[in-house]
Image: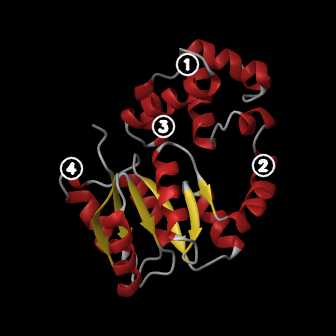
Amino acid sequence: MQSKIKVMLVEDHPEYRETLEFVLGKEKGIELVSQFGNAELALRHIQSCASDQQPDIILLDINLPGMSGLEAMPWFEKYRPEVKIMILSQSDMEADVLLAVQQGASGYLLKSCKMAELTQGIRTVYAGGATLEPGLANFILSTLQPQMPKAAIECNISQREREVLSLIGDGMTQKQISTQLEISIYTVTDHLKNIYEKLKVTNAPQAIGKAYRTGILPTDHRQ
């Protein structure tokens, strides 16, 4: 039996927390395991809580008292790099959206979104995808796509996955990549698994070869 998607909510408005608690409580396959009114408490909790209470996804507001959601993102990444972050905010400022995505957010939805969009977004992110507020998607794509090779975009290869591919191409082991990128070796393994699936290959040499052939990695990167 598939386990439930465990969600942490970091939101400073009690009424909105209550609304989400009610909605997620009725949703099959999703469990709200913790909620906090500020990022500092959430960070302390995620460092110390039992493994069965660790979230799969963090629903994170941006405008929080004290440390903002954007300021907290690198710390969540440091303590629990395997946890995925979805921004749930009132802010539709392009700078906020861009910074959140560049820092690794797997989703960005506005609080005005329908609850069905939110729950579907949670499932999409948990499955390895990404979800963006429709009105902001065109801006993100037009801003970020020029920085990524067309082949990487078509294969849905993320910037972090390109980094892992590049380091594998340099001859690094998974342990060395873990140290270089300051992520756990389990996260490196997950990235490689995703890369193999997206490129439709079965091992690292095949992945590197295809990455060079298709332009995901530049040929001048070869030694």
Q: Amino acid at mark 2?
A: Gln
146 relative to 37, above or below = above
Disc 3 marks a residue whose amino acid type is Gln
Residue in the picture at 44% in, 33% down? 190
Near mark 2 (Cα within 10 A), the count class, few <14, some 14-19 or many ≥20, is: few
Residue 183 pos. (x, y %): 42, 42
Residue in view at x 54 percent, y 54 percent: 106
List the residue tagged with mark 2. Answer: 145
Alpha-carbon span between mark 2 and mark 4: 37 Å
Mark nearer the N terminus (4 vs 1) = 4
Q: Nearer the viewer, residue 173 or 204?
A: 204
In the image, residue 14 sits, relative to residue 33, either above or below, namely: below
Callout 1 amino acid: Gly
Q: Earlier in the sequence, mark 3 or mark 1?
A: 1
Out of 55 and 213, give the one closest to the viewer.
55
Q: Which mark is residue 52?
A: 4
The alpha-carbon separation of the residues under discs 2 and 3 comes to 25 Å
Q: CA distance from mark 4 to mark 1?
A: 36 Å
User: What's the CA distance linking mark 3 and mark 1?
Assistant: 13 Å
Q: Which residue is mark 1?
A: 171
At 41% across and 82% down in the image, what residue appears?
16
Distance in Å between CA atoms under marks 3 and 4: 29 Å
Three-letter residue code for mark 4? Asp
Residue 165: which quarter of the image?
top right
**Residue ID at (68%, 15%):** 209
As drawn, which residue projects farthest toward the left?
50
Which of marks 4 and 3 precedes in the sequence?
4
Point out the frontmost of discs 1 and 2.
Answer: 2
